[in-house]
Structures are given as C-alpha cells and as structure tokens.
C-alpha cells in the first residue's frame, strides 16, 4: 500500500517571498543603471551580468511559487490517505483485469487477510460468495440484455460503463465465516478516461441485517397478534363466555374433589398411623416379624400421607385458596429449623450436610411456613437422589434487593432433556422404576409456592457432578415493631398503677392477635409486643415488664438465646420468662425448663392453663418485690 509523503514543514508564505525577490530585483536594476552610465568595457560586462541575474531571479521566483502550490494538494492527499486507511470500512483497489492491488487495513480487519496474501494474487470474486456472483451475473445479463460472465466482470460491469453501482454481497473471511457487506463499486480512470482499475468500498452490514430480521419478526408477531385479536372480537362472545364458565366449573369441581378426597383419606390414615405407632411402642415390644410388618405399615402410611398433602397443596394452589402470611422473616432461622428436621434422613443415608453458620440472618419478605416447606422439599430431594457418602451444601447470599438460597447435591446430575421436563406434574424424570419413593408433584408445588410469594426458582446441573436448586425472594430488613399513626408504646403512668405489663415476643401475627384477645379480657394487664428477640430485649430493658412471654423459634435469635441474654443482664434477670412454643414433645418441655424458663406453655393455647400460668408468674414477681401484692393478685 502506498501513502502520500508528508507536507514539508516551514514552507514560506508567498508575500514575504515576493517582497524579497522584488527587493533583490531593485538592487540589481540599480547596479545595472549605474553601470549603464559608464562607457567603459567593464560597465558592459556588469550590465550583462545584471541582466542574467534578473532572468535567474525571475526563474527562481516562479519555481519557488510553484513549489508552494502543492501544500493544498499534499493536504488533500493526506486526508484521502487517512480515509482510505480507515479501519471502519474496507477499500479494495484492483487493476483493469480485476486483480487486487490495494487492500486497506479496514479490509484486513473485516476479512482476516493480510494485504500481502491477496495483492497481485486474487480478485475480489475470490473472497465473495460464488453462488451470489453467479446469480448477479444472470440478473445483469437479463437486465442489460448482454451475456455477463460470473466473476470479476459481474462485480464491476456497471461501474465500467459509468453506471452507479451499490449492491449487497456476502464476503467470506479467511476463517470461512461469512458476513453481509454493502459495496460501492467505482471505475478508476486516467487522464484520457481509460479504465485503469476498480475501487470497491464495503461496510459490514451484519448489524443492519440483524435489525431488519428482528423488525421483521416483530412485525410478524404484531400481525399475528392483530389477527388473533380480530378473530376473538369476531367470534361469538356468548360461546366464549359459556366455554369459560364450563372450564371454571370443571376446574373448581376438580379442586373441590381433590380437597375433599384428601381430607376424607387423611382421617382414616391418621388412625392407621396412630395405632401402628402405638403398637410399635407397646410393652412388651412386638416380635421381630410383627415389627417388620409395622415398619411396612408405617412406611406406606407416611408415604401416602405425604402424597395426600402434596395433592391437597396442589389443589389449593390451583383453586386459589392458598393464603400467604408474608412478613419479614429470617431465612437463616428457617434453614436452622430445616437442618434439625432433615438431619435424621441425611444420617440414615450417610449424606454430609453443610449449612450456613450463624451470622447474617438474610431477612426476606415471605411466608415463614411456606418457605420452610419449600426448603424441606429441596433438601429432601437433594438427599434422596444423592450418592452414598455424598454431600448437600446449603448457601445463602444477597444479590441486590434479592436473597438467594441454594441447595447443591453431589448426585448424578440432570441432562438437558431432564432439565427441560422439570416442574411437570407426575413426571419423575425416569425414576419411576427406581427404589426411591416419590409422587412427581413435589417440585410443582414448590415452584408454585415460590411464585405465589413473589419469588423465583431455578436449577443448574452438570451430569456426573451434581445439581443446584435455588430460590430467590425479595430482601427485607430485620423485623421491627410497627406502630399505627399516632400510637405510642404503652408506658406505665400514675393513673395506670393498677395494671401490670406483659411483653410478648412472637413473630407470627396470628399468635399475636390471639394473645391480644386473651389479654383484652384482663383489666389488670396491658400488653407490649415484639416480633423478634432483639427488639424484645430492648423493650424489656426500657419498660421493665412484669412478665415476658417468649416464642422459641424466632428470626435471627431463638428464644433460648434471648433467655440467656435476659438472665445475664442485671436489668432483666429478675423478670420471669415463660415459653410459648409449638415444640410440644416432653423432651422439648424438659429442655425449656432446664434452660431456665419459668413455665413452658405449648400451642395451641389452652385458655385456662394460660391464665393460670399468668397468675402464677405475677405472684412470683410480687413475691420478689417486683409488684405490689394487692395489684399483682386478682
């Protein structure tokens, strides 16, 4: 490739040069005139020299002026070179026979060739789609009524005849890939208008082609949508309404039937499971054959109960009867509950479980019970379809305003075909003949529950490595005590000295409402509420309640942890703390009393027991000088 030489620097402008040459000429003329008046031989010689010098001076001036003219020409040439060597478009110049002579940097970038690979060797037709060149030759032959040979002639035929020629052609890169290019072909001519070559300037047309394809697809979809809408409008509205009503009736009947059957099956099944468990724990214990039979009864019964529950959940979701109690809740606390529930199943199969350690609570806005149901299902599947001695890892992390919990197993993994069939009802992905029990609807229920809570569920899997199921929920801040407009926290005032204070720490709004109704029946008590242990401890230090009623499964910090902190704090160590929990087995009650709870009440609340426990706690507070006996006892 050739480039123009740079413009010489510091070329003098014309006016100073003209003045210099004029001054020199005047001096020479003056010398000549002086010599003219002298009649000697020397004067004649001087006059001759002056005349010669004047002629040389005039010639030198003309040459110098002429040398100054190419500045604009050189400037234009440099600009043309800069354009020609631009990397944004390809410039290919050929000789009269179409052989490439110049291949600029833009062409190198677009086509992947070095100029040395093509110059004096190939024609532009060699790097173009052969079928398109043949088609172009045929079309031009018909258009111009003259035979045109496929090849370079087809590319430059119009330009050779002075016809503006801009067309689209597919270029082929060095690596074999193709891209559409928009070409402008011009004939290059000498001073006598003889064609000495051709210039092909091209731009990559890929982006425009993609835009055109996308626009065509959008136009097609819009047209299809318009046609579909028009067909709906033109159809019989009465028939559509009738069909809708029939479909809704059928769906409602199906859901009601499933719900009814689930409840009807649950009643006798509870009896089967109950008596089977009683027989298994009988004294003396059953014989070995009897125990085996009981184990089979219990195994089948629990499996059937799980199937009934999943069918009932699916029916309720489809019928829109699922109610969500969404609130700020600790995902870490739910995972800790799940860890305790799933541990026996993992230990039985030799699966190692890894859960997040205590730390960031990862609060989300969701239904606590449903989130636990989702995580238990994912964990159960991760254990069930794992390999012996495998592992299950649970992780939590925040992604912007979303919190993601993932469950990763080390099982066989899922193929692309299997992943495409996930979340299909009653599809067990080929596990029907395996040893693992399952219904094939657990993941369907899981996804629908997640979506009902405004969340998202997904899966990543590699065959032979394992599978990761993840769920995302909207992130939330830690629960706080929310007061209505104009409300303030209850404060003991002089005219309220007859009332004692009960602080209830509970994260379930339904339980809070129930206790509020119960305390409203007692004129000697007023109620403070907190929805997490940290807020409860702050209120306890500030308002010094007479009794604290504490839930065990609280977000972030459990009731046991809060109890220890309250007992260790001199400001609150004297306050009797009663537990109120759904953990109602005898061992849980013993554990709670051993931890230092004044009383351990269980859910559902028994009103008489609850009221008596309050009286005993108030009497205890009065006995320790924390309340006036007259006001503490009813």
Image (spheres, helix red, strand yellow):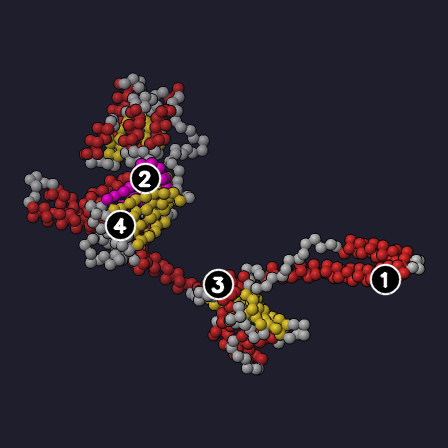
Question: Which residue is at a point 11% across and 43% down the rendered structure image?
Answer: 280
Q: Nearer the viewer, mark 1 or mark 2?
A: 1
Asked if the residues shown at circle 1 and circle 4 are in contact, with their CB atoms under 8 angstroms apart, the answer is no
Tag 2: Cα neighbours inside 10 Å, few (<14), some, or many (≥20)?
A: many
Rendering coords of residue 59 (x, y %) = 78, 62
Question: Which residue is at a point 31% across and 19% down the rendered structure image?
Answer: 626
For mark 2, what is the residue?
332
Rendering coords of residue 173 (x, y %) = 47, 66
Vertical relation: 631 (above or below) 336: above
Question: Which residue is at a point 60% across and 62% down the rendered structure image?
Answer: 3
Tag 3: Cα neighbours inside 10 Å, few (<14), some, or many (≥20)?
A: some
Q: Earlier in the sequence, mark 3 or mark 4?
A: 3
For mark 3, what is the residue?
112
Asked if one can make out residue 417 in the rendered structure from this viewpoint, the answer is yes
Give the secondary structure at mark 4. loop
For mark 1, what is the residue?
48
| Residues drawn in magenta | 352-377
Tell me how far mark 1 sits from mark 2, CA to CA: 113 Å
For mark 4, what is the residue?
410
Residue 485 vs residue 118, the one in the foreground:
118
Tell me how far mark 1 sits from mark 4, CA to CA: 110 Å
């Amino acid at each position: 490739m050739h480039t123009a030489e740079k413009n010489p620097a510091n070329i003098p402008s014309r006016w100073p040069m003209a003045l210099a040459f004029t001054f020199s000429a005047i001096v020479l003329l003056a010398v000549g005139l002086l010599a003219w008046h002298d009649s000697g031989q020397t004067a004649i010689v001087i006059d001759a020299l002056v005349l010669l010098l004047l002629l040389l001076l005039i010639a030198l001036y003309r040459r110098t002026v002429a040398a100054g003219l190419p500045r604009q020409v050189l400037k234009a040439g440099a600009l043309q070179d800069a354009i020609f060597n631009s990397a944004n478009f390809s410039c290919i110049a050929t000789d009269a026979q179409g052989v490439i002579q110049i291949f600029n940097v833009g062409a190198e970038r677009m086509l992947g060739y070095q100029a040395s690979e093509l110059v004096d060797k190939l024609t532009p037709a060699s790097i173009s789609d052969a079928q398109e060149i043949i088609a172009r030759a045929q079309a031009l032959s018909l258009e111009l009524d003259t035979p045109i040979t496929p090849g370079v002639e087809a590319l430059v035929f119009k330009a050779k005849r002075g016809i503006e020629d801009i067309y689209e052609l597919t270029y082929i890169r060095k690596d074999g890939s193709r891209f559409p290019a928009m070409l402008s072909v011009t004939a290059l001519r000498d001073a006598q208008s003889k064609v000495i070559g051709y210039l092909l300037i091209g731009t990559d047309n890929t982006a425009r082609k993609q835009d055109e394809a996308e626009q065509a697809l959008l136009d097609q979809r819009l047209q299809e949508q318009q046609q579909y809408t028009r067909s709906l409008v033109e159809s019989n509205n009465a028939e559509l309404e009738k069909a809708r009503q029939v479909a809704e009736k059928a769906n409602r009947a199906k859901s009601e039937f499933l719900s009814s059957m689930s409840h009807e099956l649950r009643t006798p099944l509870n009896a089967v499971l109950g008596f089977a468990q009683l027989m298994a724990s009988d004294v003396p214990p059953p014989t070995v054959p009897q125990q085996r039979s009981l184990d089979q009864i219990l195994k089948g019964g629990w499996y059937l109960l799980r199937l009934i529950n999943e069918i009932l959940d699916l029916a309720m979701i489809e019928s829109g009867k699922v109610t969500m109690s969404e609130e700020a809740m600790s995902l870490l606390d739910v995972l800790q509950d799940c860890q305790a529930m799933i541990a026996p199943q993992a230990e039985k199969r030799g699966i190692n479980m890894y859960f997040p350690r205590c730390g960031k609570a990862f609060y989300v806005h969701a239904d606590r019970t449903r989130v636990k149901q989702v995580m238990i299902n994912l964990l159960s599947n991760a254990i069930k379809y794992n390999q012996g001695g495998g592992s299950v890892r649970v992780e939590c992390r925040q992604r912007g305003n979303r919190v993601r919990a993932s469950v990763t197993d080390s099982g066989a993994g899922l193929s692309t075909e299997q992943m495409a069939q996930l979340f299909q009802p009653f599809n067990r992905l080929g596990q029907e003949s395996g040893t693992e029990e399952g219904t094939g609807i657990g993941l369907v229920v899981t996804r629908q529950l997640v979506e009902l809570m405004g969340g998202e569920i997904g899966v990543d899997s590699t065959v032979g490595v394992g599978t990761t199921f993840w769920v995302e929920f909207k992130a939330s801040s830690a629960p706080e005590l929310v007061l209505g407009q104009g409300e303030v926290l209850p404060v003991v005032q002089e005219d309220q000295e007859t009332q004692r204070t009960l602080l209830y720490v509970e994260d379930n709004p339904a339980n809070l409402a129930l206790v509020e109704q119960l305390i409203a029946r007692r004129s000697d008590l007023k109620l403070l509420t907190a929805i997490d242990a940290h807020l409860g401890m702050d209120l306890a230090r500030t308002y010094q309640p007479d009794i604290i009623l504490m839930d065990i499964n609280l977000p972030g910090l459990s009731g046991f942890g809060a109890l220890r902190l309250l007992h260790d704090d001199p400001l609150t160590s004297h306050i009797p703390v009663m537990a109120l929990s759904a953990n109602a087995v005898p061992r849980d009650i013993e554990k709670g009393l051993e931890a230092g709870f004044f009383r351990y009440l269980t859910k559902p609340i028994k009103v008489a027991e609850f009221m008596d426990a309050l009286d005993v706690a108030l009497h205890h507070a009065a006995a320790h000088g924390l309340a006036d006996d007259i006001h503490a006892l009813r």
